[in-house]
Image (cartoon, rainbow, N blue to C red):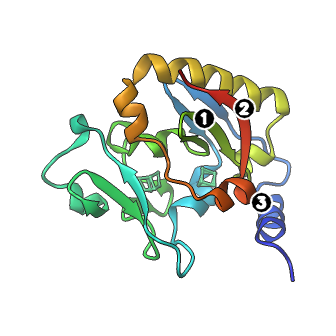
Amino acid sequence: MPTEFAALARRWRALFAGTVRPFRWTEGRLDNGYCAECRHCCGPQPDGDAPYPMPLLPSQLRPDLADDFHLLSPSVACLDQRGCKALGDAGCRLDRRRRPPSCNLFPLILHKGELYFYQICPAVLFSTLDALLDIGETAARDLQRLYTPDELQAISAPLAPETLVHKCISLDLRLG
Ligand code: SF4
Ligand code: SF4
């Protein structure tokens, strides 16, 4: 039986064959030219998976949040089997200031003060090793400048150990 990794890798090869899209760290966020066609990580999550929390910062709270997100609490958006409410036909329809901070980093993941890449993202798979390490090192510096320690803790992804092992690449970079 094919693995999820192999099936998705073949899908990216067919979808993006021969085209290199922008993938760069800009002003505290990742610009990713693959997202609009890919939409993989913003779509419906696998049956049985718990809702994935995406905390918002106090400055992002507004009365109409429920129009854009499924909410776990007044300040925590989530991604579940319904997919994200903000996902449109051409990727995320929210401007960057309205997205949860973890979305502005993804496929870079902050977990317990360390940085990882989500390995099956096409931007990661089609990147060079140099580019991935440069993004990680720059992000590690910028995130500590842009966010307080409490905010960094709030936007840290609550990943299970098996997810880290099977789906993520550790950059061995620690903030703080
Ligand atoms: S898997 Fe990567 S390219 Fe696809 S939507 Fe997520 S961040 Fe974007
Ligand atoms: S807010 Fe946008 S980037 Fe974040 S999960 Fe939803 S659609 Fe994806």
Q: Is residue 61 visible?
A: yes
Q: How far from the left and from the top, in percent, is residue 93?
A: 40, 53
Looking at the figure, which quarter contains the N terminus? bottom right
Q: How far from the left and from the top, in percent, is residue 102?
A: 46, 43
Classify 10 Å Cα crowding around label 2: few (below 14), some (14-19), many (20 and above).
few
Residue under circle 3? 12
| Disc 1 residue lies near ligand 1 with CB under 8 A | no
Question: In the rendered structure, are the residues bearing label 2 and label 1 in contact, judged by CB atoms less than 8 Å apart?
Answer: yes
Classify 10 Å Cα crowding around label 3: few (below 14), some (14-19), many (20 and above).
many
Q: Secondary structure at mark 3?
A: helix
Residue under circle 1? 114
Q: Nearer the viewer, mark 3 or mark 2?
A: 2
Q: Is residue 64 left or right of residue 26?
A: left
Tell me how far mark 3 sits from mark 2, CA to CA.
27 Å
The disc labelled 2 sits on which kind of residue? Asp
Q: Secondary structure at mark 2?
A: strand
Relative height, residue 31 to residue 123 (above, below)? above
Residue under circle 2? 172
Classify 10 Å Cα crowding around label 1: few (below 14), some (14-19), many (20 and above).
some
Q: Tell which quarter ligand 2 is in.
A: bottom left
